[in-house]
């Protein structure tokens, strides 16, 4: 995969997940195996996450050169942290195993796309 394809795939993933999380936080959470009925604050947290992903997508697609590298690096840091959080949630039992796998896999996929984009500068 070349840099342009990696960035386009990453931006598409971020916009899809971010928009779904912000616009429809309960159904989006349910797709990831999360129970928003058990945690009424979950939609608020989903919207925080969603807008972050949309901002990272916008930054990566609307910039070039060093600025784009900075956006991609910030996104990679977030994706690595999200991966660790997903694993921790599964291991510590506050995320169901299925949800842990889904959120971690999504974050790892985004991290991989960001790493590919950064490695091909």
Image (cartoon, helix red, strand yellow):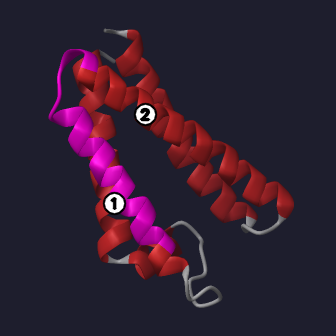
- Badge 2 density bin: few <14, some 14–19, many ≥20, Cα 10 Å: some
User: As rendered, which of 98 and 3 lies closer to the eye?
Assistant: 3
Q: Is residue 98 left or right of residue 91?
A: left
Q: Quadrant of residue 21?
A: bottom left
Residue 50, compared with residue 121, is above or below; it is: below
Q: Quadrant of residue 120?
A: top left
| Percent x, y of residue 13 | 34, 47
Residue 86, compared with residue 64, is above or below; it is: below
| Percent x, y of residue 39 | 62, 85
Residue 105 visible, this angle: yes
Q: Is residue 2 magenta?
A: no
- Badge 1 density bin: few <14, some 14–19, many ≥20, Cα 10 Å: many
Numbered label attached to residue 51: 1
Residue at the spot 46% in from the left edge and 79% down from the top edge? 43
User: As rendered, which of 120 and 102 lies closer to the eye?
Assistant: 120
Q: Which residue is mark 2?
A: 74
Mark 2 vs 1: CB contact within 8 A? no
| Percent x, y of residue 26 | 45, 81
Q: Is residue 80 left or right of residue 19?
A: right
| Percent x, y of residue 60 | 25, 34
Precedes in sequence: disc 2 or disc 1: 1
The residue segment tinted magenta is: 45-66
Report, in whole angstroms, how far the alpha carbon at label 2 lies from the one at label 1: 14 Å
Residue at the spot 65% in from the left edge and 88% down from the top edge? 38
Residue at the spot 82% in from the left edge and 66% down from the top edge? 93
Numbered label attached to residue 95: none
Q: Quadrant of the N terminus?
A: top left
Residue at the spot 53% in from the left edge and 44% down from the top edge? 107
| Disc 1, SS | helix
Q: Is residue 53 magenta?
A: yes
Residue 26, compared with residue 121, is above or below; it is: below
Residue 17 visible, this angle: no
């Amino acid at each position: 995969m070349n840099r342009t394809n990696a960035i386009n795939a990453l931006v598409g993933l971020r916009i899809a997940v971010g928009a779904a999380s912000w616009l429809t936080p309960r159904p989006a959470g349910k797709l990831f195996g999360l129970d928003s009925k058990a945690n009424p604050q979950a939609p608020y947290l989903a919207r925080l996450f969603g807008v972050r992903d949309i901002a990272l997508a916008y930054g990566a697609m609307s910039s070039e050169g060093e600025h784009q590298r900075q956006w991609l690096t910030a996104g990679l840091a977030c994706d690595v942290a999200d991966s660790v959080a997903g694993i921790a949630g599964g291991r510590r039992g506050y995320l169901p195993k299925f949800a842990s796998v889904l959120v971690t896999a999504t974050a790892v996929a985004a991290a991989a796309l960001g790493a590919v984009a950064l490695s091909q500068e």
